[in-house]
């Protein structure tokens, strides 16, 4: 083992020590809090673009079938199976599994010409979230981490990047460091876990522990002047500040009326969408909510119908609610997935559809995006992109453009390698109003 390997091992050991010590001694996690410590890092100058200030990123994990949702082919019964097509607002054709979404298609830009080079779940999900293919030698920052790095947080104490029902593997800060990772939320009703002082520890005792921890930290940092350890110290301070902040109510869905909660629906995804709306109203810049279960190799039509029932009400409610509150104009709502499904229906797998990265659909709404629009075109079976091909990187560049971020800005990793928020992607500027 060389000296660099030893140093990396030491860094991981010290990092784990701080995490474990905070959990055991203070009763809190060092969850990633993007507060005042990040604000001190000057964000890059923004470029021209749309009107978005916030992003709500809805990720359909598993590979959502474009044919059975946003790119139906009504003249191809052999392709569509039992999936019906209905006409939404602005004469936009859409799956019959999405009746509520059909009522808000006048607010949506459906991009039917996405194409990816990644046909496996892990790799496809990684590319959608990071703009790069996974590599064993580096961990790229998540897209939300890039947004915070380039634009900075808005609220001085609340995290700027929150992920609901989302694996931490796709929302880490990568080589930007832990302070740019998402604050994870499991169940929306439970809010931000470990953000309150333990009932077993009195306020006076807690303050004495903090004082002792600060003394130990100063000695530790003097002996080990390491950038990773310093980053976790900043997270520690931000976590403590948030624990004492009245703004924690941003995570409390009990503050919403029952009528509003019913508008969205009762499932985790539905309530996650409501929590996302609540968080952006409290100046959390980027919120991801994930809905899994779209991997429909077997019994595609029953699977898609079930997923659409959970998605449909919540998504339509989110757009309607944001617009009613005057927030849709500055909030970009993204619907994304790693790839689509094959036009071929596999009868041996109870009418399943397999992975299909060559052509699939994603959706943008709000944040300066034109509504009632379909961009790009697939062939008659939905197998290949016929017009307006959009790469994953182009799609991510479009999100950056909506936020007015410099998508061409190059930042260097610790190993002095150049990276951009969307790699070589270029935004679709024609879909902005």
Image (cartoon, rainbow, N blue to C red):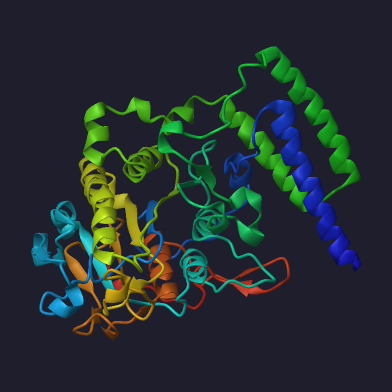
Query: Residue at (42%, 68%) from the top-left corner?
Result: 396
Quarter in which the N terminus is drawn: bottom right
Quarter in which the C terminus is drawn: bottom left
Which quarter of the figure has residue 108?
Answer: bottom left
- The percent coordinates of residue 378 (x first, y second) are 24, 81
Which quarter of the figure has residue 205?
Answer: top right
Image position of 430 (left or right of 175): left
Q: Is residue 173 above or below residue 123?
A: above
Observer-nearest of 312 and 159: 312
Image position of 101 (left or right of 393): left
- The percent coordinates of residue 412 (x first, y second) are 66, 69
Image position of 181 (left or right of 416): left
Query: Residue at (70%, 19%) from the top-left corner?
Result: 206
- The percent coordinates of residue 400 (x first, y second) are 43, 64
Observer-nearest of 76 and 321: 76
- Is residue 51 visible in the rendered image? The answer is no
| Numbered-mark total | 0
């Amino acid at each position: 083992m060389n000296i660099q390997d030893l140093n990396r091992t030491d860094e991981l050991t010290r990092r784990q020590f701080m995490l474990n010590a905070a959990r055991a001694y203070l009763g809190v996690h060092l969850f990633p809090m993007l507060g005042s410590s990040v604000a001190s890092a000057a964000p890059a100058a923004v470029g021209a673009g749309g009107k978005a200030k916030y992003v709500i990123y809805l990720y359909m994990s598993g590979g959502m079938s474009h044919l059975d949702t946003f790119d139906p082919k009504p003249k191809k019964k052999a392709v569509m199976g039992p999936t019906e097509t209905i006409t939404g607002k602005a004469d936009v054709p859409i799956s019959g599994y999405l009746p509520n979404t059909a009522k808000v298609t006048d607010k949506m830009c459906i991009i039917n010409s996405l194409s990816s080079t990644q046909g496996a779940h892990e790799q496809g999900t990684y590319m959608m979230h990071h703009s790069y293919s996974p590599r064993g030698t580096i961990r790229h920052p998540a897209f939300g981490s890039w947004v915070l790095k380039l634009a900075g947080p808005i609220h001085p104490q609340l995290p700027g990047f929150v992920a609901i029902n989302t694996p931490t593997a796709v929302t880490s800060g990568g080589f930007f460091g832990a302070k740019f990772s998402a604050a994870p939320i499991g169940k929306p009703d439970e809010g931000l876990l470990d953000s309150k002082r333990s009932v077993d520890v009195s306020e006076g005792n807690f303050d004495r522990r903090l004082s002792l921890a600060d003394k130990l930290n100063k000695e530790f940092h003097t002996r080990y002047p390491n950038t990773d350890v310093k980053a976790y110290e900043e997270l520690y301070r931000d976590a403590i500040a948030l624990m004492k902040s009245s703004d924690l109510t941003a995570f409390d869905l009990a503050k919403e009326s029952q009528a509003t909660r019913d508008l969205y629906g009762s499932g985790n995804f539905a309530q996650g969408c409501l929590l996302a709306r609540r968080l952006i109203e409290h100046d959390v810049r980027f919120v991801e909510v994930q809905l899994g279960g779209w991997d429909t190799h077997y019994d595609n039509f029953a699977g898609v119908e079930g997923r659409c029932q959970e998605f449909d009400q919540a998504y339509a409610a989110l757009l309607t609610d944001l617009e009613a509150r005057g927030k849709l104009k500055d909030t970009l709502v993204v619907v994304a997935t790693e790839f689509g499904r094959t036009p071929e229906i596999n009868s041996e797998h109870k009418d399943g559809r397999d992975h299909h990265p060559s052509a699939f659909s994603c959706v943008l709404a709000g944040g300066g995006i034109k509504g009632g629009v379909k961009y790009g075109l697939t062939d008659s079976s939905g197998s290949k992109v016929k017009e307006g091909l959009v790469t994953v990187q182009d799609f991510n560049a479009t999100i950056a453009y909506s936020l007015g971020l410099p998508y061409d800005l190059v930042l260097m990793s610790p190993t002095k390698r150049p990276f951009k928020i969307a790699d070589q992607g270029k935004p679709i500027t024609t879909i902005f109003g």
